[in-house]
Amino acid sequence: MPIALYALTAGAFGIGVTEFVIMGLLLDVSADLGVSISAAGLLISGYALGVVVGAPLLGALTGRLPRKTLLLALMVVFTVGNFACALAPDYWTLMAARVLTAFAHASFFGVGSVVATGLVAPNRKASAIALMFTGLTVANILGVPFGTWLGQAYGWRSTFLAVTLVGVVAFAVIALLVPRDDPAPTGEEEHNSEGTLAVLGRRPVLLGLLTTVLSWVGVFAAFTYLAPILTRVTGFSEAAVSPILLVFGGGLVAGNLLGGRLADKHLAPTVIGTLIALSAILFLMTAAIHQPIAAIIAVGLLGAAAFATVAPLQMWVLEKARGAGQGLASSFNIAAFNLGNAIGAWLGGFVIDHGPGLGAVPLVAGLVPLAALGVVLMALRLERGRAIGAPAPAQC
């Protein structure tokens, strides 16, 4: 793999830490800023909203920028946003800084995916995407625990200062290692039917985005409530949850790399297979969470199955968005992951409060990837229908 890919991995690591580290600092933030824990928790929701809004907004504003220039600009936004978080004098300033930082999230991973695929041979594209996303998985395993420890030991602001430094380093390595790309699109390319904005009206792209949303609704319906499931259903102590989550993180890394490798060989079968595996493991968790050893194994498998879908789903949308609109479609797919996260957290909470309860969350979560599978099969059938009808001039 080209060394430039590791520069993208460094940026992904910093963004991953920023997104998730706040979870371990909610008590510190709420005490320091004088807000409730639930209000501090909205800093997570605000970030997710920033990701979803940032994809179309920055996509429309930056569609003509060269990709390396855009990546560097996004790292500036990321770095400034984290520095503003560290200096925020009150809750609402911190919220605004979090949303600003989130704007860089979807566009960085979206444009980074396109850049990553352009750095490697055609049969290594999904693996290149997976390598970039390894930064996100390592952030969950190492960066978030370290950032939480740092914030608890020296104040939560120190964590955001540390992430600011990561942003500076990531900017430097991207500037040094990522090669220059083509200049901004010409007016002719911009108005082409395959152009930047037109790509979002294509049915295969929209079906790909829907597949991503549905698959990650299932993931986050279970993952959001993993800690209470382990303590209240399985019977683990609260102290045991963090080591078990390391098992989940190990699964993330393994599944991410495996999914990329398989997608390089057979993309559509890998998308189908990973969705089936994700659904099956969620169903198995329904029984496994009642036995400690089985629960730990299931948690690791859930991490592997969840991130085994990431590179294939990202590559799936890129394949459907050929042309100048790849960067925008790719960014929207990152927003689709985050939209799935938000809906999944709501779905899990609904099952707990108004449904069969905490123990049934994995069962309900397992149904949603099956809906994603149905969307994929429908998309493939539509593609076959178009391929059969393509030679007829009247259908062009």
Image (cartoon, rainbow, N blue to C red):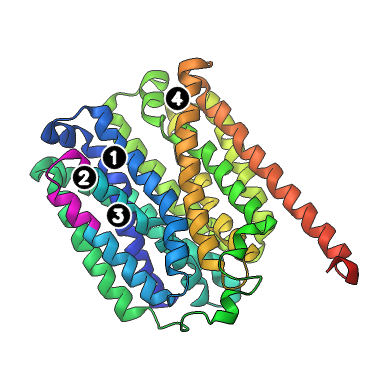
Question: Quick one: label 3 or label 1, which is nearer the N terminus?
Answer: 1
Which residue is tagged 1?
Answer: 43
Which label belongs to residue 349?
4
Q: Quadrant of the C terminus?
A: bottom right
- Amino acid type of the residue that numbered disc 2 sits on in the rendered structure: Leu
Other residues around mark 1 within 10 Å, as few (<14) / some (14–19) / many (≥20): many
**Secondary element at tag 2:** helix
CB atoms of marks 4 and 2 within 8 Å: no
Q: Is residue 298 visible?
A: no
CB atoms of marks 2 and 1 within 8 Å: yes
Question: Quick one: label 3 or label 2, which is nearer the N terminus?
Answer: 2
3D distance between C-alphas at marks 3 and 1:
12 Å
Q: Position of residue 292 (x, y in %)?
A: 42, 26
Q: Is residue 169 left or right of residue 215?
A: left
Which residue is tagged 3?
Answer: 101
Q: Position of residue 152 (x, y in %)?
A: 14, 40
Other residues around mark 2 within 10 Å, as few (<14) / some (14–19) / many (≥20): many
Looking at the rendering, the stretch of residues picked out in magenta corresponds to 81-92
Which residue is tagged 2?
Answer: 94
Q: Is residue 288 left or right of residue 87?
A: right
